């Protein structure tokens, strides 16, 4: 076991867009600009639903799925990179 019994892994969620409750309710972008902008800029042409993001967190929280993962990063970014 790792000294102290602590392992660390990360879910990288940026810069890929994700849908939130406010987005889905149309409160943030009521005129549909978000969808149009994502289609133009995002490689996947869509924002990630929360279910897709949650799978990465659940994987890392599961000892049986990630018990041998130390210092890893799962990039849930929709293909976007941090560069401009």
Image (tube, rainbow, N blue to C red):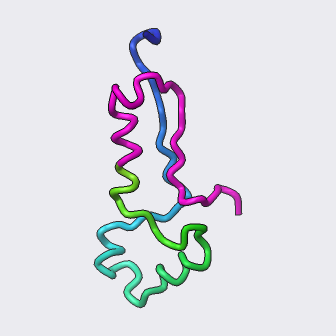
Looking at this rendering, what residue extends furthest in the front direction?
64
Question: Is 30 positioned to the left or the right of 11 in the image?
Answer: left
Task: Give the residue displayed 56% in from the left and 58% down from the top.
Answer: 15
For the point 70% across and 58% down, which residue is it? 83
Which quadrant would residue 60 be assigned to in this image? top left
In the image, 6 versus 65, the foreground residue is 65
Q: Is residue 54 above or below residue 73?
A: below
Location of the C terminus by quadrant is bottom right
- Residue 39 sits above or below residue 2 on the image: below
Residue at 53% of width from left, 61% of height from top? 16
Image coordinates for residue 1, horizontal then vertical, percent: 43, 10
Q: What segment is highlighted magenta in the picture?
A: 55-84
The answer to whether 10 is drawn above or below residue 4 in the figure is: below
Task: Give how far across and how far down residue 28 sits, in percent.
Answer: 38, 78
Q: How many marks?
A: 0
**29 and 59: which is toward the camera:** 59
């Amino acid at each position: 076991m790792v000294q102290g019994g602590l392992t660390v892994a990360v879910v990288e969620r940026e810069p890929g867009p994700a849908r939130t409750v406010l987005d889905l309710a149309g409160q943030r972008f009521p005129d549909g600009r978000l969808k149009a902008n994502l289609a133009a800029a995002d490689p996947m042409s869509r924002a990630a639903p929360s279910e897709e993001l949650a799978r990465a967190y659940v994987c890392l929280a599961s000892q049986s799925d990630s018990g041998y993962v130390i210092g890893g990063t799962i990039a849930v970014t929709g293909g976007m990179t941090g560069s401009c």
